[in-house]
Image (cartoon, rainbow, N blue to C red):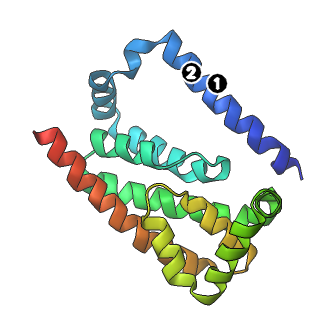
Amino acid sequence: MWLRRAVPFIWVSLVAFGLMAYLRYPECFNLTALEGTTAEHHAVALLVYFLILSIRGLVLVPSTPLLISGIVLFDPLEAFVVSMLGILTSSTLVHCCARHLGFDAVLERRYPEQAGQIRAHLMEHQFPVIAGWSICPVVPTDLVVYLAATLRVPLWKCLVGVGAGEAGLLSLYILILRAVLAA
């Protein structure tokens, strides 16, 4: 019960902290400074990147901006591996905490028709729905993991579906961003 009340507070606190840091130290948030810091403290930067990607699903922070920053700051293979590990860790945490956060009840109240449709599709075609949802960049992957967890879809099916979808999307992001940065 305490976790349900803590999540909005944590989310607002992280956003406020980020904005205050940006306003107080704008010189630390340009690409050159970030690349320099990443090069100096490579292992720590990878660990922090992984941890942020891992917990972001619990507070419903989208992964796309984080993935893009990882692709810009790290080697493509490193960015891919660490991003996938972070996404899969986040999906595992979301799956395990879904009922405790009460997100399913909120979805049912706000979007009863859509939640019902998604549940029906998930029950019938678990893997294709999860993988298809994960590869679409405009819909939150964490949402389908929450729904799958409330339907008691096994964790391994969620992780395989999320892994397949996100691997394709992340590969596409890497190819496009590397081409843009090289030009």
Q: Decide which of 138, 1 is in the foreground and name it.
A: 138
**In the displayed image of the protein, which residue is found farthest to the left?**
183
Across and down, in percent, residue 24 comes to 52, 10
Image: 148 above or below 92? below
24 horizontally vs 70: left or right: right
Above-or-below relation of 142 to 42: below
Q: Secondary structure at mark 2?
A: helix
What residue do we see at 10% from left, 39% from top?
183
Q: CA distance from mark 2 to mark 1?
A: 5 Å
CB atoms of marks 2 and 1 within 8 Å: yes
Q: Residues within 10 Å of mark 2 (few under 14, many from 20)?
A: few
Amino acid bearing label 2:
Leu
Instruction: Identify the residue at image location x=42%, y=66%.
Output: 135
- Find residue 155 and report its horizontal and vertical position in percent: 62, 77
Residue underneath mark 2: 19
* Left/right of residue 130 with respect to residue 59 in the rendered view: left
Q: Which residue is mark 1?
A: 16
Mark 1: few/some/many CA within 10 Å (<14, 14-19, 20+): few
The residue depicted at 28 percent of the width and 30 percent of the height is 35
**Residue at the farthest bottom position:** 124
| Residue 94 at x, y percent in the picture | 66, 61
Q: Residue at x 40, y 38 (%)?
A: 45
Pick the front one: 88 or 109: 109
